[in-house]
Amino acid sequence: MSPTSTPSTRPQLAHLSAQLDDLRARGTYFRLRVLEDEQAPVCHYDGREVINLASNNYLGLCNHPKLREAAIAATEKYGVGSGAVRTIAGTMRIHMELEEKIAAFKGVEACVVFQSGFAANAGTVSSILGKEDFILSDELNHASIIDGARLSRAKIKVFRHKDVAHAEELLKEIQNEPGRKLVITDGVFSMDGDIGPVAQLCDLCDKYGAIMMVDDAHASGVLGRNGRGSVDHFGCTQRVDVQVGTLSKAIGALGGYVCGSRDLIDYLYHRARPFLFSTSHPPSVAATCIAAFDLLESEPERIERLWSNTRYFQEQLKTAGFDIGGRSTPASETPITPILIGDGRKTMDFSRALFEQGLMATGIAFPTVPEGKARIRCIMTSEHTRQQIDQALEILTATAKRLEIL
Ligand SMILES: Cc1ncc(COP(=O)(O)O)c(C=O)c1O
């Protein structure tokens, strides 16, 4: 073996190979599909042209000409990298402009941008609480919230999905404990597409003096006035202490942000570890996001198209007889559209068969979703044409019948 070739697995890592073998045996092992052109409703993965129902590119902004131009202009003006973490020398004027833009858009005092939505959640939850404190978290909250909660060393109490009465029961149990209490929910749940009970959880937080936090990753650009998110949708801007959003999905680029009071944001500048210990965005990313927020205001028709496509697609799936949630799982209320299959192997086989027929629709199995709740997860965008949606429905129906799913 030459010194540069990759060693085959040495005994030290044999446990990893064994786990991969286990995934293969269960039929849930996957290979990464490689996109060869732009993230678009019709594109090429692994050399095959497919209708794409798998991206989070809700509003088609990943390749919008104005965002592209903004990225190129910023690269020409400022170069390709920021060269440092924000607190050392990597805060560029354009980073501050983006934060001001988001804060104004959301109607809050201040905003801090992180390198990803994951970093925003994990960095925030882990830094605002300590080991005497309590976190009350919906059982289906995103992994980045769970990891942030673990890193904080606070005591974690998990309430049943969207069960506000259960959250209250847990809050009552700890109301006389000295620690702070944080209640946290996703605004839109990423695997089922249902909307979190933001207003009722705000009521609880007001009643028990708890901190209220919402992760609006899948609601940003989708719900609320001009895509301001679930917090705006419920009219709760003044009642949510910590609002997280992502720049990686509807906004079309990369990053995450936290909105709230000036002191919250100042505190995160001083204490959130991904902010302190990881280099800031290239200027092109900040410029892209600024242009995207402008578009949310100037092209609201994208959001209207997103919702009209979603309604059409979901109606047609139901008519065809698919289980798109609402029986054994929550019902989707947003463009995230699960097609419930149940068995992991069957789901992955279905996804592969769809791909062979020209449809990219990702299979999702345990551990991303609970055992027995595997599904094909489809996401509608504003840019799919009716013809593309109809063709996707035809492929879904014909393939499901062939595999005896329908
Ligand atoms: C609910 C939720 N929160 C946070 C994130 C993380 O966002 P990002 O992709 O920007 O890291 C995701 C993305 O997978 C998500 O679905």
Image (tube, grey):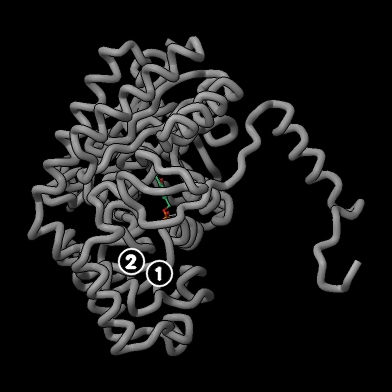
Q: Which residue does the image show at 42% across and 39% down from the upper left?
A: 175
Circle on res. 212: none
In the picture, the quarter occupied by the C terminus is top left
Q: Which residue does the image show at 21% across and 66% down from the upper left?
A: 65
Circle 1 Cα neighbour tier, 10 Å, few/some/many (<14 / 14–19 / ≥20): many
Q: Does the residue labelled 2 lie within 8 Å of ligand 1?
A: no
Mark 1, secondary structure of its residue: helix
**Relative to 48, is 101 on the left or the right?**
left
> Circle 1 sits on which residue?
268
* Proximity of marks 1 and 2: CB atoms separated by less than 8 Å: yes
Residue 17 shows up from this direction? yes
Residue 134 shows up from this direction? no
170 vs 232, nearest the viewer: 232
- What kind of residue is marked 1? Leu
Instruction: Place residue 90 in its image quadrant.
Output: bottom left
Tell me if residue 105 comes above or below residue 314 in the rendering: below
Circle 2 Cα neighbour tier, 10 Å, few/some/many (<14 / 14–19 / ≥20): many
Instruction: Place residue 348 in its image quadrant.
Output: top right
Q: Which residue does the image show at 47% across and 13% down from the upper left?
A: 402
Q: Which residue does the image show at 54% across and 56% down from the upper left?
A: 152
- What kind of residue is marked 2? Leu
**Relative to 27, is 226 on the left or the right?**
left
305 vs 165, nearest the viewer: 305
Mark 2, secondary structure of its residue: helix
194 vs 171, nearest the viewer: 194
Horizontal and vertical percent for residue 323?
Answer: 37, 16
Horizontal and vertical percent for residue 145?
Answer: 47, 48
In the picture, the quarter occupied by the N terminus is bottom right
Horizontal and vertical percent for residue 71?
Answer: 29, 75
123 vs 227, nearest the viewer: 227
> Circle 2 sits on which residue?
264
Total numbered labels: 2
